[in-house]
Image (cartoon, grey):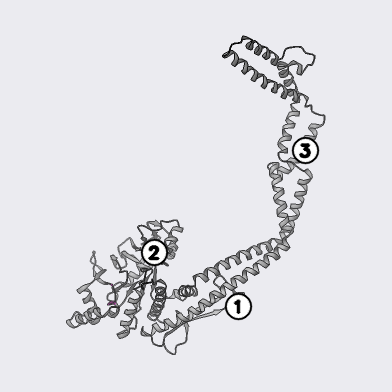
């Protein structure tokens, strides 16, 4: 609900602060006092386009802020959070708008800059304005469908249909993609086959390119390797390079040192040194064996040519599908799998077509189930709204919720239903679409009747076991011109129904009728006063007690005579649910 509305330098309003009641709030005042500017302020924080002529003369910019209390409704908070902004501050949502004389307007949510589209999305869950210009939005088929769905409480059926439709769409898009790619698949398959054959002919092995590079390096440096090995082995053990040599080996000399140390026969450093020499001798013997085996690994003539040819073949593969042989092998395995899918594409297309038909049938079944719930709710809604209109000085008026089920082939993301709200404003009038069949006041009363019926349905759903409504106001409804052409007993009934709606929702009504204003829980008067610079500006003040009684008397008789004051007191006393 709307906790607070603050306005600065908007039209004739220099500064105003409005704290509406959680139930019903009435805004009254003489014609031309500036009540419409309050509605403009609310529309601005709801994301409406701005105009520089809304800025008060002599001011550089206008500023509007609304503070909302979600009352347990997490939808607007989630919308804000998904936009990357703070979800709420101390349980409140702050929405502000500034309109400069020149330049672009700025909007913010919870102190952070936000696009105007976000204001529209957030306010859709917080506030609904029913004024002459705002009624036209309900004329849109999408708005009427959403209203009917909310009244029908068809969330389960709607969710089931949307899930089935999404699955069908995903399958259909996959099928279309494969069909569009079918021509190119043949060429792609030929390319994959040729590439796989080329790799198979070369028959590379994992890591083979690195191994061959090492072999080539060894061949190219064979002389250096041979000479180095012979010198090293000659120093370690001459018998490894010259079997007839009789020079001592390093291992043999170490053995002599070990024998000498063991011969001392004293533990401690001598024994430890002998053990260390034995360990060194073991490692040395292993090293000599490794180096001597390299001497035996002679390179055959022609090995270098063979290796270079093999490296060339492998390089051709890595250049196209590398950068390494392992990458080439991985590409070949993936291509084989892709080729299997392509080779089976006709069967897969048929399989996917069958699945697509199945998913569409499921979506159709879900759409028909949704249609049945909508049809029943539409008849109920039309009948109850028509009954409400009788009490709003619109005898003979009626609403018909027309639901036409389209053929199966016309299924779309909203189901099978074409939904139209047809309004008959007076007896004998043809049934016409909303927005083309009534005045602003008649449309406001029609919307009031619709909101009343919807509120009654919500109240039934929200009743607890002891019969008390468990939830507070979840939506703010603002009505303008709802009292146009209404008077007498019908005006009292209009006020009563606004108060009834205010039992479950916050209601703000701009009215000229004392019979309506008398039902409000809070009452604000908009009047003209002297401005700071000597001009005229709009003043908004809350009235209660005697001051409210005088305002009701003014609305009744245009004066504050004893008779009008008494009449006002009686009216206020009788305006109770």
Residue at the bottom extreme of this rendering: 428
Q: Quadrant of residue 99?
A: bottom left
429 horizontally vs 533: left or right: right
User: Residue 380 in the image: x percent, y percent?
Assistant: 46, 81
Instruction: Tell me the element at label 3.
Output: helix
Q: Quadrant of residue 249?
A: top right
Q: Is residue 206 above or below residue 61?
A: above
Residue that carries the numbered disc 1 in the rendered image: 407
Query: On the rendered image, what quadrant is the N terminus found in?
Result: bottom left
Task: Tell me how far mark 2 sits from mark 1, CA to CA.
Answer: 41 Å
Residue at the left extreme of this rendering: 562
Residue 310, numbered label? 3
Residue that carries the numbered disc 2 in the rendered image: 72
- Is any atom of residue 282 visible in this view? yes
User: Residue 138 in the image: x percent, y percent?
Assistant: 45, 75
Of the residues under marks 2 and 3, which one precedes in the sequence? Answer: 2
222 horizontally vs 35: left or right: right
- Is any atom of residue 436 visible in this view? no
Instruction: Tell me the element at label 2.
Output: loop
Question: Does the magenta run of residues contain 374?
Answer: no
Q: Residues within 10 Å of mark 2 (few under 14, many from 20)?
A: few
Q: Residues within 10 Å of mark 1 (few under 14, many from 20)?
A: few
Dominant secondary structure of the magenta stretch?
A: loop
């Amino acid at each position: 609900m709307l906790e607070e509305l603050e306005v600065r330098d908007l039209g004739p309003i220099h500064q105003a602060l409005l704290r509406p009641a959680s139930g019903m709030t009435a805004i009254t005042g003489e014609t031309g006092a500036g009540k419409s500017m309050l509605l403009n302020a609310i529309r601005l924080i709801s994301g409406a386009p701005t105009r520089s002529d809304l800025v008060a003369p002599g001011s550089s910019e206008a500023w509007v802020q609304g503070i909302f209390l979600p009352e347990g409704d997490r939808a607007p908070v989630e919308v804000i959070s998904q936009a990357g902004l703070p979800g709420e501050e101390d349980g409140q949502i702050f929405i502000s708008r500034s309109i400069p004389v020149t330049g672009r307007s700025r909007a913010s949510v919870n102190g952070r800059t936000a696009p105007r589209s976000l204001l529209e999305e957030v306010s859709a869950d917080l506030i609904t304005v029913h004024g002459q210009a705002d009624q036209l939005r309900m004329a849109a088929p999408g708005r009427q469908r959403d209203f009917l769905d909310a009244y029908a409480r068809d969330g389960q059926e709607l969710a089931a249909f949307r899930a089935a439709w999404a699955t069908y769409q995903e399958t259909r898009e996959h099928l279309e993609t494969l069909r569009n790619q079918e021509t190119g698949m043949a060429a792609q398959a030929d390319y994959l086959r040729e590439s796989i054959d080329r790799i198979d002919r070369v028959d590379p092995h994992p890591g083979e390119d690195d191994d061959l590079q090492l072999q080539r390096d060894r061949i190219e440096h064979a002389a250096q390797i041979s000479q180095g090995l012979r010198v090293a082995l000659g120093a370690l053990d001459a018998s490894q390079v010259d079997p007839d040599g009789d020079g001592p080996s390093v291992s043999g000399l170490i053995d002599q040192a070990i024998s000498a140390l063991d011969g001392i026969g004293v533990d401690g450093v001598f024994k430890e040194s002998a053990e260390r020499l034995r360990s060194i001798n073991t490692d040395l013997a292993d090293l000599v064996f490794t180096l001597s085996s390299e001497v035996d690994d002679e390179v055959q003539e022609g090995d270098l040519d063979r290796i270079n040819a093999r490296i060339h073949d492998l390089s051709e593969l890595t250049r196209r599908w590398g950068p390494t042989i392992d990458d080439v092998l991985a590409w070949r395995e993936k291509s084989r799998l892709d080729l299997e899918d392509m080779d089976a594409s006709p069967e897969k297309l048929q399989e996917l077509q069958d699945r697509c038909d199945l998913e569409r049938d499921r979506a159709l079944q879900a759409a028909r189930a949704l249609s049945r719930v909508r049809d029943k709710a539409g008849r109920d809604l039309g009948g109850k709204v028509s009954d409400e209109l009788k009490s709003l000085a619109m005898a003979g008026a009626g609403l018909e919720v027309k639901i036409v089920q389209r053929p199966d082939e016309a299924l779309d993301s909203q189901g099978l239903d074409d939904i139209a709200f047809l309004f008959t404003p007076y007896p004998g009038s043809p049934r016409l679409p909303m927005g083309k069949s009534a005045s602003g006041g008649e449309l406001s009363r029609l919307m009031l009747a619709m909101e009343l019926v919807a509120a009654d349905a919500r109240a039934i759903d929200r009743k607890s076991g002891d019969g008390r409504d468990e939830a507070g106001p979840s939506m703010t409804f603002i009505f303008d011109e709802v009292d146009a052409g209404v008077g007498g007993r019908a005006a009292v009934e209009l006020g009563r129904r606004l108060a009834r709606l205010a039992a479950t929702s916050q209601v703000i009504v701009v009215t000229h009728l004392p019979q309506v204003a008398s039902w409000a829980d809070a009452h604000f008067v908009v009047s003209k006063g002297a401005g700071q610079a000597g001009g005229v500006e709009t003043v908004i003040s809350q009235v209660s007690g005697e001051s409210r009684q005088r305002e009701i008397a003014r609305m009744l008789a245009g004066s504050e005579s004893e008779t009008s004051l008494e009449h006002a007191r009686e009216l206020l006393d009788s305006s109770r649910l």
